[in-house]
Image (tube, rainbow, N blue to C red):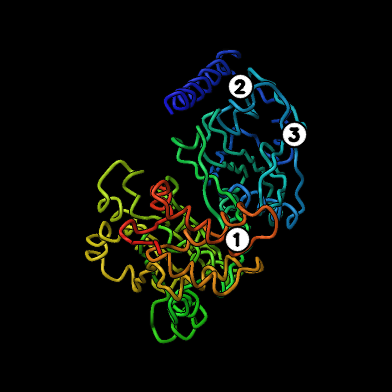
Amino acid sequence: MIMAFDRLEFAVAFQEFLNHLNAEAGGGVTRTSPLGERVQDFLGVGLGTMDPVVEQFGEHLTIDVDHAAAVLNERHGGERIGVFGPHREHVGSFLDLLLGSMFRFEPGPVSQVRKPVGPDTERRVIAFGISLLRIGGVPLAVLQQTANARFGREEYRLEVLSPDPAVADGYLRELREVMAAESVFRGQVLTFHRDDFNSFSGGAPLTFLPRPAVTDREVILPDGELERIVGHVVGIGSGAERLRTAGQHLKRGILLYGPPGTGKTHVVRHLLSVTPGTTAVLLSGRTLQYISVATRLARANQPAIIVLEDCDLIAEHRGGDTNAALFETLEALDGIDGDADIAFVMTTNRPDLLERALVERPGRVDLAVKIDKPDATARLRLLRLYGNGLGFSDDALHRAAGRTEGATASFAKELVRRAVLRAAGPVTDGDLDAALTDLLSDTELFTRTLLGHDPQASGKG
């Protein structure tokens, strides 16, 4: 991280140095570059008579900004040109490109980079280019530059030049309207990733995830429990207009808590499966720091679900007290209006660590559901689920369910996997019995603990 920070400082200092050389090279006299002449001819006024209107966007909005700019370019009959010349990435502003005396930039090809727009799809976006267009007969020139921490740019940047500042402002308003109406994020499942640069720069690069496919038959909970969870997350959204008319809030929070390995994440995956078209933002571990970005994305792309997995670990990645870190997270959630169709789903293995923060912020969570270890009936259902199609007899499954008191869904899944691994050919009841005996042996005590098995349970017999 220190090395990355030093690089950013160097990039900023080097850019300032080049700007200084740029001014010194002509004895302080600015000269219009060939690129500047092209833009000046289009705008019809001297470049020195205009101040650019600058707008910066979070790196995660690169795709939406580029798409909206392309829509406006087509809508207003614009054209695009690139920038040819050395060290263009280090030039500080649009006017420096056009008026600089050291580097004589010329029109050239538009630079592009590929960015993901879905789990398996990408498209090109402008990394460095200029759009020339007219709105209501008034000319504008728009410089687009992608974020690049190596050159000291942490955000996607637009600079708009126009003889009429009001038209430049109108362009940016229209751009934001298109971004809101046609966001590539709407209906997607999203999370964040980190790298050496954005770990300190404040960037929040997004990753698109495939939407899970988990049916209700694959979620083993006590009767009525899954329906209660789905009804709270999905049902409230389906009655959105009726609730708004009645003056009731739509924003809701649900806490899934219980021992490790009991299926809380599996329940979340099911919720994502039954909400196609709903925007979902998943945060866990270090990405919990992006809660503010996630809430803004959700607000702009409703209906939405924000998932905070293992939210008791927030403090571990914030370097502070759990309650203080959770208070900060809850404050971010408070920034969303009550009539926003957004569900917050939090999971934790340690509800005791969250209780104080949640009690002192009443109403943030309006449903708490314990996902407990399965009883004998549920263990049998789990073994039938994971052993489906493998040919185990009902007697063998009943025996295994009876021997696995204190086991979790993760334990049942691993048991079936080990039975398959033991089999030289088609898996048999004997393979299931032997795999269970191995898992219940003293040598597998730590393995059982990792799978969420209760070490106090006898598990033998």
- The image shows residue 287 at horizontal and vertical percentages of 45, 47
Categorize mark 2 by other alpha carbons within 10 Å: few (<14), some (14-19), many (20+).
Answer: some
Question: How many angstroms separate mark 1 from mark 2 (CA)?
Answer: 48 Å
- Of pointers 2 and 3, the one earlier in the residue sequence: 2
- Of pointers 1 and 2, the one earlier in the residue sequence: 2
- The image shows residue 298 at horizontal and vertical percentages of 49, 62
Give left or right: position of 327 versus 291.
Answer: left
SS of the residue at dot 2?
A: loop
Which of the two discs, 1 and 2, sits closer to the camera? 1
The amino acid type of the residue labelled 1 equals: Gln
Above or below for 371 versus 133 = below
Residue drawn at x 33%, y 59% as measured from the top left: 330
Above or below for 245 versus 331 = below
SS of the residue at dot 1?
A: loop
Residue denoted by label 2: 30
* Quadrant showing the N terminus: top left
Question: How many angstroms separate mark 2 from mark 3 (CA)?
Answer: 16 Å
Give left or right: position of 327 versus 434.
Answer: left
Which of the two discs, 1 and 3, sits closer to the camera? 1
Which numbered disc covers residue 310?
none
* Quadrant showing the C terminus: bottom left
- The image shows residue 453 at horizontal and vertical percentages of 39, 58
Residue denoted by label 1: 188
Residue drawn at x 30%, y 50% as measured from the top left: 325
Which numbered disc covers residue 38?
3
User: Marks 2 and 1: in contact by CB < 8 Å?
Assistant: no
- Of pointers 1 and 3, the one earlier in the residue sequence: 3
The amino acid type of the residue labelled 2 equals: Thr
User: Marks 3 and 2: in contact by CB < 8 Å?
Assistant: no
